[in-house]
């Protein structure tokens, strides 16, 4: 049993780490402060092939896999989570549903630009009154001749309102099953479609350089051919997509937690108190040792879940464990890093303040920590 990355993954890791240090780190604080989407960085990541990492070459992808994506996300989040989540959501929630469930014609039309980072796609599942209860979907789509007519709204949708957003895939009630249960389908809505409105950006606690909007649909007409996958399977499709995207978000959490360790190690070797470098005090050493242990554990969790996924084995439980453990690590490490930095940790001039603000959403997005515990328990037969 060997937990080292293969040469190909390690080469990717080093490339992305260098990009994060030299391209992301110098500009991200300003982007964050201005709540500005990182268009230039997204374009560079597109040219590097990062948006095409897990997709086949026939659609413009790099021919890699989901572990490659996770490795890249970890290194990006080690410096900044907003940039990492632009990539994570663009692939796992935006392009991946199209790749997994789309027709060849749909893939050939949309995937090349998505793989190149020239366009972004988004995933509209959450609704203002739904939150965790995604099955409570109220958005409706009625088939009128050869078009779907969509009415409803979605909330907290990442990458949904950028200048390069090309489409949003939304879940909608398209009928009623036997017993009165909702029939939920997934439908692709191109940006700019009449009746599709994007609200102004949210004012957020964290991920401030990420794009997040509420969406509304009023008599929004799209071709019937924009149905993604099988009618009535939209909810099941996206439950499967969420299993995968939890791996991606777990990698983001690990990167943030590791970034906290990196920043603290630099700081405690320079900062003096009571005549000594604070890194010489055992109280500080123990804090950082615990931080590193959390990162190590969380990284192994997502590596193992990704390995099961790549082998074609069930990984639902393992993905939830990875997401739960990594989000805990991110929260705990960012809190401890802020404490180690003291007053400076409360200043936005320092990355740990940004890490602290970014960490909390990791316990909420892609299913809250409570939802992950529910999934784990159910997978155990409880």
Image: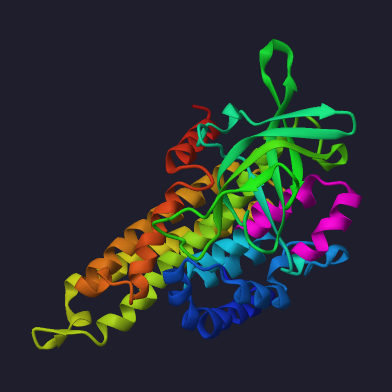
Looking at the magenta stretch, what is its main secondary structure?
helix
In the image shown, does 307 or 204 lie closer to the viewer?
A: 204
In the image shown, does 334 or 301 lie closer to the viewer?
A: 334
User: What colouring method underlies this structural image?
Assistant: rainbow
Using the image, determine if residue 201 lies above or below residue 336.
Answer: above
Residue 329, horizontal then vertical, whole percent: 39, 58
The reply to whether the magenta stretch includes residue 112 is: yes
In the image shown, does 76 or 134 lie closer to the viewer?
A: 134
List the single residue furthest toward the left. Answer: 274
Q: Is residue 58 left or right of residue 331?
A: right
Residue 114, horizontal then vertical, whole percent: 75, 62
Quadrant containing the N terminus is bottom right
Residue 2 in sight in this render: no
In the image shown, does 92 or 167 lie closer to the viewer?
A: 167
Residue 374, horizontal then vertical, whole percent: 48, 34
User: Residue 217 appears in which quarter of the rendering?
Assistant: top right
The number of numbered discs placed on residues in the rendered structure image is 0
User: Residue 347 appears in which quarter of the rendering?
Assistant: bottom left
Q: Residue at x 87, y 40 (%)?
A: 225
Q: Residue at x 74, y 45 (%)?
A: 194
Residue 382 in sight in this render: yes
Q: Is residue 340 left or right of residue 46?
A: left
Q: What stretch of residues is rendered in magenta?
A: 89-114
Q: Residue at x 29, y 61 (%)?
A: 335
Residue 43, horizontal then vertical, whole percent: 67, 75
The reply to whether the magenta stretch includes residue 101 is: yes
């Amino acid at each position: 049993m060997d937990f080292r990355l293969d040469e190909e993954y390690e080469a990717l890791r080093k490339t992305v780490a260098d990009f994060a240090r030299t391209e992301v780190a110098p500009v991200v604080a300003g982007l964050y402060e201005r709540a500005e989407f990182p268009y230039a960085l997204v374009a560079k990541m597109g040219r590097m092939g990062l948006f095409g990492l897990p997709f086949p070459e026939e659609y413009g992808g790099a021919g890699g896999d989901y572990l490659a994506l996770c490795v890249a996300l970890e290194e990006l989040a080690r410096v900044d989570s907003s940039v990492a989540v632009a990539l994570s959501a663009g692939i796992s929630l935006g392009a991946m549903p199209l790749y997994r469930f789309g027709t060849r014609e749909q893939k050939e039309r949309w995937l090349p630009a998505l793989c190149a980072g020239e366009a972004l796609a988004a995933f509209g599942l959450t609704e203002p009154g739904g939150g965790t209860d995604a099955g409570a979907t109220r958005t409706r789509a009625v088939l009128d001749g050869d078009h779907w007519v969509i009415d409803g709204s979605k909330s907290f949708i990442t990458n949904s309102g950028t200048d390069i957003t090309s489409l949003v895939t939304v879940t909608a009630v398209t009928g009623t099953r036997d017993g009165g249960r909702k029939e939920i389908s997934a439908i692709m809505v191109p940006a700019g479609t009449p009746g599709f409105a994007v609200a102004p950006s949210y004012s957020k606690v964290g991920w401030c350089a990420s794009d997040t909007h509420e969406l509304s649909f009023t008599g929004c007409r799209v071709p019937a051919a924009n149905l993604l996958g099988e009618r009535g399977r939209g909810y099941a499709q996206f439950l499967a997509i969420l299993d995968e995207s939890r791996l991606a978000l777990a990698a983001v959490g690990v990167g943030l937690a590791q970034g906290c360790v990196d920043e603290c190690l630099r700081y405690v070797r320079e900062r003096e108190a009571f005549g000594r470098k604070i890194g010489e005090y055992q109280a500080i050493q123990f804090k950082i040792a615990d931080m590193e242990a959390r990162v190590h554990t969380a990284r192994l969790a997502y590596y193992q879940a990704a390995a099961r996924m790549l082998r074609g084995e069930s990984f639902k439980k393992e993905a939830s464990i990875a997401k739960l453990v990594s989000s805990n690590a991110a929260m705990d490490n960012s809190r401890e890093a802020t404490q180690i930095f003291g007053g400076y940790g409360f200043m936005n001039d320092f990355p740990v303040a940004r890490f602290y603000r970014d960490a909390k959403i990791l316990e909420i997005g892609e299913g809250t920590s409570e939802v992950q515990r529910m999934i784990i328990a159910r997978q155990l037969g409880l």
